[in-house]
Amino acid sequence: MKPKLFILAIFLLIGGYMAAQSSVQIKDIYVQPITGIDSTSMNNQLEVMFKMNNQADASVLHLQFGTAQDLGDVLTIDASIIEQGGKYYVSYGGVEQLIVGYDTSLSVELTQSQESAYSYITLYIGDINGESSNKLYFIK
């Protein structure tokens, strides 16, 4: 009887875990500096790019610049993912960046102290059901 109960418990745990995962999945994080901007600002511009499926279920892009993974102690950004006219955009700081196919990006401005302080970028998506996607990590 105990082995059957144990197997049932395992199936329930696996089923509950799978049900709690978001349908939004992300992959292939890439970060590059944006150069050639004609600006008097001393801040640094970065373009954070990745691929995302199921944009219709995506709600918020969470981006954490930190001294460790999953830590936003340097800078935390929550950008909205919106739909307009059948197209999806990342909306942050009054700027909307078009999501083309699976390709998604966000431009971020960091002060010089933020640029030197962070070692990791953690990226994940919150969906319309309140669930979170998988996480991506970029190591500086």
Image (spheres, grey):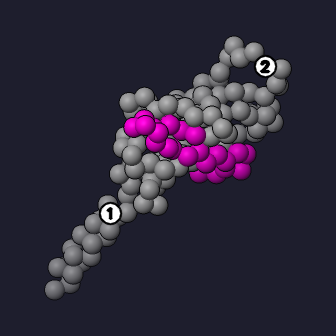
Furthest residue toward front: 85
Q: Is residue 74 magenta?
A: yes
Q: Nearer the viewer, residue 87 or 104?
A: 87
Estimate the x, y position of residue 9 in percent, counting from the top left.
27, 76
Vertical relation: 56 (above or below) 88: below
Estimate the x, y position of residue 71 in percent, counting from the top left.
64, 51
The quadrant of the picture occupied by the C terminus is top right
Vertical relation: 101 (above or below) 133: above
Q: Nearer the viewer, residue 6 or 27?
A: 27
What kind of secondary structure does the magenta stretch mostly adopt? strand
The residue at the point 57 percent across, 34 percent down is 96
Check disc 2 and report the residue beneath it.
39
Q: Quadrant of residue 95?
A: top right
Q: Secondary structure at mark 1?
A: helix
Range covered by the magenta-colored residues = 70-91
Q: Secondary structure at mark 2?
A: loop
The residue at the point 59 percent across, 51 percent down is 70
